Image (cartoon, grey):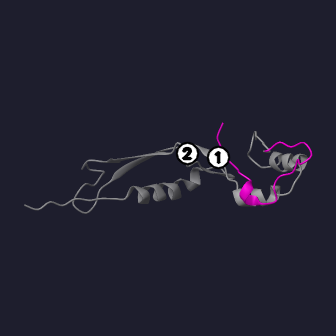
Amino acid sequence: MAAQGLTYFEDDVARLVDKMSDGFIPEGFKLSDKEKEIDTKVLGQTDTSVLNDTEVDLQVTLKTFVVPSIDEEELKNELAGKNVEEAKKVLGSIQNVKTYEFRLTPNIPFLQKVPKNTDKIFVTIERE
């Protein structure tokens, strides 16, 4: 007895969906990796779909959010060594960002500067 089947890699489907969704994402935004759901269903054999040993029609559904497209490394370099007011100006000028939170730790009154070492600067992008 012999059996045949088709397989696919979920990562390949995810990359394909990301590439195909580019035209639907507003300029200045990107797909969020958080809360991303991809659902794949095999369509049965009909007049308009294929299901055989070598081909299959799939219905792929993507559910996710878009977030501002920000180059985190570039932002860290821009913030490095700035005082609090300068850092807030930089953050406030980022396109497509409605709100931001700026925290300097430890909060020492006479040392109110962003570290020069970008490894000590943490950027987190979240949706509202």
Disc 1 marks which amino acid?
Val
**96 displayed left or right of 86:** left
**Number of other residues with Cα within 10 Å of mark 2, as a class: few under 14, some 14 to 19, many 20 or more:** few
What is the quadrant of the N terminus in the image?
A: bottom left
**Number of other residues with Cα within 10 Å of mark 1, as a class: few under 14, some 14 to 19, many 20 or more:** many
Taking the image as drawn, is residue 53 in sight? yes
Taking the image as drawn, is residue 71 in sight? no
Mark 2 or mark 1, whichever is nearer to me: 2
**Which residue is pictured at 84% across the width and 51% down the height?**
90
**6 versus 39 height, above or below:** below
Q: Name the residue under label 2.
A: 34
| Number of marks in the rendered image | 2
In x, y percent, where is residue 107? 83, 42
Q: In what element is the residue under mark 1?
A: strand
What segment is highlighted magenta in the picture?
106-128
Q: Mark 1 points at which residue?
A: 67
**45 displayed left or right of 125:** left
Q: Which mark is residue 115?
A: none
In x, y percent, where is residue 67? 64, 46
Q: Is residue 87 magenta?
A: no
What is the C-alpha distance between the residues marked 2 and 1? 10 Å
In x, y percent, where is residue 46? 25, 48
Task: Return the disc, 2 or 1, that comes first in the chain's sequence.
Answer: 2
